[in-house]
Image (tube, rainbow, N blue to C red):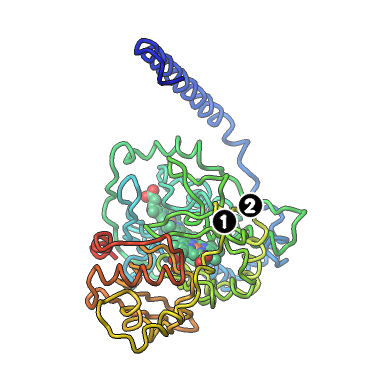
Amino acid sequence: MKATKSPAARTANRARQKRAGAALSATLFCAFSLYIAWHASHESQTRPVDELPMSSARGDDSPASAADADKPELVRRGEYLARVGDCAACHTADPSRPFAGGLAIDTPFGRIYTPNITPDRDTGIGQWSDTDFVRAMHEGIGKGGERLYPAFPYVEFTRVAGRDVLAIRAYLNTVAPVHYTAPANALRFPFNQRWLMILWNLFNFDESRFVPDPKQSAEFNRGAYLVEGLAHCEECHTPRNFMQGLRTTERFSGATQAGWQAYNITPDRAGGIGDWSDDALIAYLSTGVAAGHANAAGPMADVVQNSTQYFTREDLRSVVAYLRALPPVSGGKTRPRDAWGKRAADGITALRGAPVTTVNGLQLFAANCASCCQWTGAGMGTNAPGANDLARVILHGVARKTKDADVLMPACRDELGNGQVAAISNYVTKRFGNPQATITADPVAALRAEPR
Ligand code: HEC
Ligand code: HEC
């Protein structure tokens, strides 16, 4: 039908669409103004109640007042919670000045530097009251009333119980004050206008504490409290809408994070982690390795190193119980990532004794990787990711420290050319990963030039 329309009809159609667009914008604007007016008049009455019956979700029964009376215990709990929230990952740019900020975070809207959250009075949060601190964590509002950017995961932190936020504050009060101011943000107009976050929040932020589900077990609720709140797993594992808000209809179904694929972690057997045992998941989160499934690299290696390896057994079990109960999302996958062609062995056997004529991926793999990664590929975790991520691992290596082991895969950028890195990536993804994921020398050159 479309093809037979006259130019005049098309113009009329376009004008109609334009009018509809203008009407929609006007309606949205009015709705927004009404919302602001309503919010301003209701602000004081609608503050959510902070202390919900969290003890059921928390798995401990100690009343808040007892914890508050015991200062060292409060600080210890705050330190644990700060690890769960991985505050150090974003607020430490230089390990010699922990929590002093200065880490550059690149967003689609420009570059944001994390602020100093040490108790330094001039450059840190030394002059913040507890109320200021709680407001920042729960509402994304800074000390001067300014709107904070959601690169600070307050969309998740808002769910954290007030007393846990105060424990984190108590711990941060004990870290060494560092006199340091991060560079100014480099955000493009209009994103450098902080007040615009009011609009963003309207569509993408629900300021409310976590409410345990009485129909679920205490273990599930504790897991939900951690995963949806302080541990902010969704920051990377939930896809985003065009405003960079979390797409709440596809939670945990996987997203791209800093160029890495943060996989689907719903319990779908093909698309997600449905075929992992509880022990495999716990091993992955506490050591970075789940034999036969995956070996954490990139941003997840950092998450394991700075955060999940410190989770208590009970908390790990709770996280797993929660992930298992999520609605499964297949994402159109028919086969788990770790079930693609498992055995390089046949290839290596065929190579034995054969004259080496051309340099191919298998030979390069045998020469460069097989000694560390075991020639079946098992040592790599057979979860060969997309060819991009793998090429990145080959170029830049893996450095992940946990309390059990330091995993160090050497970087091969100086030893291998772009074509060779592409050949190895393609070989490994074909044998152990998804055969459809391939890469050529040009993108490898681009990955090589990436800042690390
Ligand atoms: C994913 C990165 C990330 C993580 C994790 C993170 N933050 Fe931040 N945080 C930021 C960014 C970015 C800002 C600055 C936002 C802005 O400038 O609007 C910020 C701002 C803050 C502020 C406001 C400081 C100021 O001077 O305005 C506080 C307080 C804060 N974070 C505390 C924490 C605590 C406590 C944790 C751990 C529970 C934490 N953050 C974890 C990225 C992070
Ligand atoms: C900073 C971003 C980020 C955060 C936060 C994060 N992840 Fe991940 N996660 C990733 C990336 C990227 C990968 C893929 C790692 C790789 O390629 O080796 C991953 C992989 C995983 C995997 C392995 C999936 C597979 O099929 O191989 C699991 C399980 C997982 N994450 C769980 C979690 C949980 C639970 C949390 C919260 C406690 C979390 N992640 C927080 C980025 C993140």
Residue 242 can be seen in this image: yes
Q: Provide residue 137's location: percent of width, then percent of height.
A: 50, 52
- Picture coordinates of residue 38 (x, y %)? 56, 27
Mark 1 element type: helix
* Left or right: 247 in relation to 46: left
Residue designated by label 1: 229
Q: Position of residue 96 (x, y in %)?
A: 32, 73
Where disc 2 sits, the SS reads loop
In the image, residue 81 above or below residue 16: below
Q: Residue at x 26, y 55 (%)?
A: 183
- Measured Cα–Cα span from mark 2 to mark 1: 8 Å
Q: Nearer the viewer, residue 190 or 267?
A: 267
Residue drawn at 63 percent across, 55 percent down: 328
Q: Residue furthest right?
A: 215
Q: Residue at x 61, y 55 (%)?
A: 161
Mark 2 residue type: Phe
